[in-house]
Amino acid sequence: PPEQLPLDPTKKTLVVLGSGWGSISLLKKLDTEDYNVVVISPRNFFLFTPLLPSCTTGTIEHRSIMEPLRHIIRHKKRAVKYYEAEATKIDVDRRVVKINDFSDVKGNVSETEVPFDYLVVGVGAENATFGIPGVKENACFLKEIGDAQQIRKKVMDCIETATFKDQTEEEKDRLLHMVVVGGGPTGIEFAAELQDFFEEDLRKWVPDIADRFKVTLVEALPNVLPMFSKALIDYTEKTFKDENITVRTKTMVKKVTDKNIEVEATQPDGSKVKENINYGLLVWATGNAVRSVVRDLMGQIPAQKNSRRGLAVNDYLVVDGTDGIWALGDCSATKYAPTAQVASQQGNFLARLFNSMAKTQAVEEELRSLDARLQASTDDAEKTLLTAEINAKGRSLSKVKQLSPFQYSHQGSLAYIGADRAVADLNWFGGAISSATGGELTYLFWRSAYVSMVFSLRNRILVLTDWLKTKTFGRDVSRE
Ligand code: FAD
Ligand code: NAD
């Protein structure tokens, strides 16, 4: 990488929280020459979440979808500071962020403060559990790399334990029952990957489990994938049936213990029936909840009183009730769904906004100095020249100031549903044409779309190699 400009004490400090879809898109397009940028995140890499479900079974190795933050910031014009830490409190009045190093290795200092002139909050969301007892203690989630690794290990643990000598029949059935809660895209894609793993690899290498391995998806609403069109919902449910994945809709999980879940199922006549379902692996994918640092920030700002889903922002992503604080992605509450597509477009928008703010400030400074020269000048010819220059600068200032508000452009929704099939609700030409497709061709489209979207050429090559490896040798069934 080329030599970088050092930090400049005359520039404003822009602190960016998080290294996910929102913050990294901002960082990619931001002209760091104009600011002293500080990034704070407990994760020193960007994670390409759309392929995370594939890591739970080893279709893709986890490092293939991670891009080190150090690679990203080392290519910026001016040096960017990075602290591997969690923001634990954003103090709006004092304009500082309290940060804490929760990593395993700590130095003398593991807690400190970072002052900011401008702040971008892109900390994402945490897993919603709705306070349902036992979920946090017993379920696996699917948001981070560590979650995918834990699931991969636990699937193999369940299989090896089920085949342990003298294991009872009932216990074998429990251990080989994989339950997924939440019929959103995370739950659907994970269930699909798991069934693929069973059909393509486990059935062959561990034939003892061939008749017992079972995947059940539990969803509280009447259907899965509510963001897709009716035809694609039906197609997904039919494909799952063909793949032998049991879908239990209108079934709400009420309580979780270490070996079973208690559900309340709504019958066709509207009556409710309680039932216990035993499981070996439980994966919980019921959407997002607000992180504590965000909740605390909202508590400091009266204008956020009525916001529930996250930080309320205006059309320019400024946090309502603040000055110089922006929010993007899953930690903000907007009319859009909490997706990578939205977060990355918001990141691009904020980069444009900060780049244009810096330009505005530079032009304003030039205007001030021209004006001072004009006031001091006694020469008529010089005055005419200076006036013309001031007018020209004034026009260019109004141009850079004209940034229109954030507007989301929906490209469509894509999800993998197993057995080399995917569903896609796509918008072409800015929504002028839309199409809903499902099947094997859509799967090829899903693959090529994701491989073209991963962060770097390095990631692209790694993902393609993993797919080829899986196709050629099958997935690795050793437990790490
Ligand atoms: P994130 O990407 O979650 O990033 C948050 C960042 O903040 C992380 O770096 C985190 O470490 C950091 N952080 C957390 N706490 C703190 C703190 N206290 N201080 C500082 N930093 C902190 N969306 C799509 O559009 N298409 C898809 O195909 C798709 N697939 C998905 C598959 C899965 C399995 C999952 C879980 C999500 C998927 N999504 C998809 C949704 C998408 O990943 C999110 O909407 C997106 O990640 C939101 O971006 P973000 O920047 O707001 O948050
Ligand atoms: P989600 O919010 O989309 O779906 C969660 C589901 O869980 C809902 O259908 C809800 O009815 C159900 N649920 C909630 N409580 C329940 C309970 N107690 N018992 C049974 N079911 C319950 O969550 P997600 O799938 O994690 O997705 C989060 C966000 O990430 C969404 O915006 C989604 O669009 C995005 N995402 C997109 C993709 C993709 O485009 N391929 C993949 C993954 C995630």
Image (cartoon, rainbow, N blue to C red):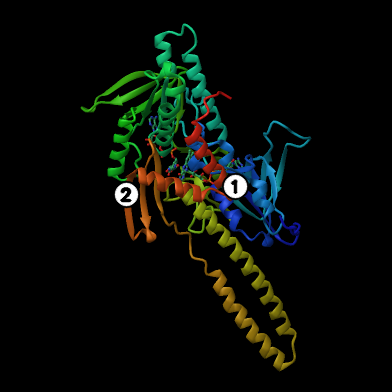
- Seen from the viewer's position, the closer of residues 470 and 331 is 470
Q: Which mark is residue 104?
A: none
Mark toward the viewer: 1 or 2:
1
Q: Secondary structure at mark 2?
A: strand
Circle 1: residue type: Arg
Q: Residue furthest bottom?
A: 380
Circle 2: residue type: Ala
Residue 33 in the image, given as x and y percentages of width and height: 68, 61
Residue where numbered disc 1 is placed: 458
The residue under the point 36% across, 23% down is 263
Residue 161 in the image, given as x and y percentages of width and height: 50, 15
The residue under the point 50% across, 51% down is 452
The residue under the point 32% across, 47% down is 437
Residue 243 can be seen, yes or no: yes
Residue 75 in the image, given as x and y percentages of width and height: 67, 55
Name the quadrant containing residue 184: top left
Residue where numbered disc 2 is placed: 436
Q: Residues within 10 Å of mark 1 (few under 14, many from 20)?
A: few
Which quadrant is the C terminus positioned in? top right
